[in-house]
Amino acid sequence: MDYQSAVASLFLPEGRNDPYPAFDVLREHAPVFQADGRWWVTTHALVNRLLRDSSMRIADANDYDQFWPDWRQNRGVSSFVLSMLQTNPPDHSRVRRAAAATFTARRVNAMRDVIAAQAKDLIEAMPARADFVDAFAYPLPIGVICALLGVPDADLPWFRPRVADLTVVLEPISTEAEMRLADVAGRELQDYFVGLIAERRRAPQEDLTSALAASPDLSGEELLANLVLLLIAGFETTTNLLGTGLTLLLDDPSHAARLRADPTLAPAYVEEILRYDSPVQMTGRLATEAVEIDGAALRPGDSINLLLGAANRDPARYTDPGRFDPDRQNVQPVSFGGGAHYCLGAPLARLEAQVAFPMLVTMLPRLAQDGPATRRDRLTLRGYSALPVTIG
């Protein structure tokens, strides 16, 4: 497979199902190269550097105005573009400060007991045969983020299909039908939060929605977009992390046995899961100035794909990178991004996985996969739509 075929494969179902062979070809071809009208960055060193490079920026509302003047009419697109995910300083800095002031480390750490209690309830309720995504990987993180946001438990099942429809916006390609569904999902999610914001302004509670609604630093449009973002980011990647991590634990029973015997190994396991099969496989940047990167001459406005999944398996950074090894030292995955746009919810995702995996293998010592898992047909957001298991 040549590098052009490798790029093309990422836009096909079989390439999305397993992008790593293509990533290997692209990394061997060049650390940075141009194809399909954009630059592709493949190595850990360069991806890590460019995530933190202030000369790189996110495609924001001004950019969308240039190449898609009607983008605001699709509420799925506007939900992301108007959030801190796709804004640049100074607006990004202002909005992120407001969100970080409420999404504090202390508030996240205080969720450990909540996470453990929710995980225990879900494990105890798991039937003899179950879809792990339905029974655990989705309800745990959606329950945790909704507890932080102040969303009633009864509303949790309502979110899943809408978020699934909305997140296609983050993919490099999508169909017109998918974009119509994203628009409907965006409208419904925004309408939901309009109602919740109104309730919290009438009667504030000890939750993130109340705190953000009281912030003087957010416009109404920004508040709405960022509540939708916090909801989605709060469970989408964690659901993928939990499903992927469980398959790796079950593939080799020795991993589950070690974690059962010593739960303090959980942080190392979680970091290696994030490195080995990242829930987020790629992200984009735009060059703001002419710059040379490893011999490649980028011009202002050039579009860049940073291949996080390729970087995490770079043999120049990790020995035998295609092997899952929880004993690997100095693991620093780029799965949550870096720099100004480093994922605000990364500590919460890590905490949920660190709590969940030891509980699963301890409370369900005979947990086993029950047939093939089904991957979502996505490239950017990688995970399972179904993972059949038996609990023994």
Image: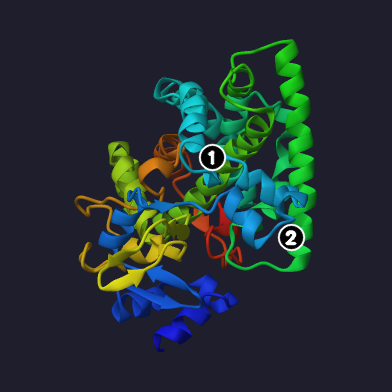
Q: How many marks?
A: 2
Question: Would you call the spot at circle 2 few (<14 residues within 10 Å), some (14-19), or many (20 or more)?
Answer: many
Cα distance between the residues tagged 2 and 1 = 21 Å
Picture residue at 27% right of the left edge, 58% below the top: 325
Q: Which mark is residue 179?
A: 2
Q: Nearer the viewer, mark 2 or mark 1?
A: 1
Which residue is nearer to you in this view: 39 or 211?
39
Question: Would you call the spot at circle 1 few (<14 residues within 10 Å), some (14-19), or many (20 or more)?
Answer: many
Q: Position of residue 8 (x, y in %)?
A: 52, 81
For the residue marked with disc 1, what is the amino acid? Met
For the question of whether residue 132 can be seen, the reply is: no
Relative vertical location of residue 334 with respect to residue 321 in this rendering, above or below: above
Which residue is nearer to you in this view: 271 or 170?
170
| Residue found at the very far top of the displayed protein | 203
User: Are the two marked residues, 2 and 1, in contact with CB atoms closer than 8 angstroms?
Assistant: no
Task: Find residue 294 and report its image quarter.
Answer: bottom left
- Quarter holding the N terminus is bottom left
For the residue marked with disc 2, what is the amino acid? Met
Picture residue at 75% right of the left edge, 11% below the top: 202
Q: Tag 1's secondary structure?
A: helix
Picture residue at 78% right of the left edge, 43% below the top: 187
Which residue is nearer to you in this view: 164 or 362?
164
Left or right, residue 268 beside residue 89:
left
Q: Position of residue 203 (x, y in %)?
A: 72, 10
Q: Which residue position holds label 1?
A: 84
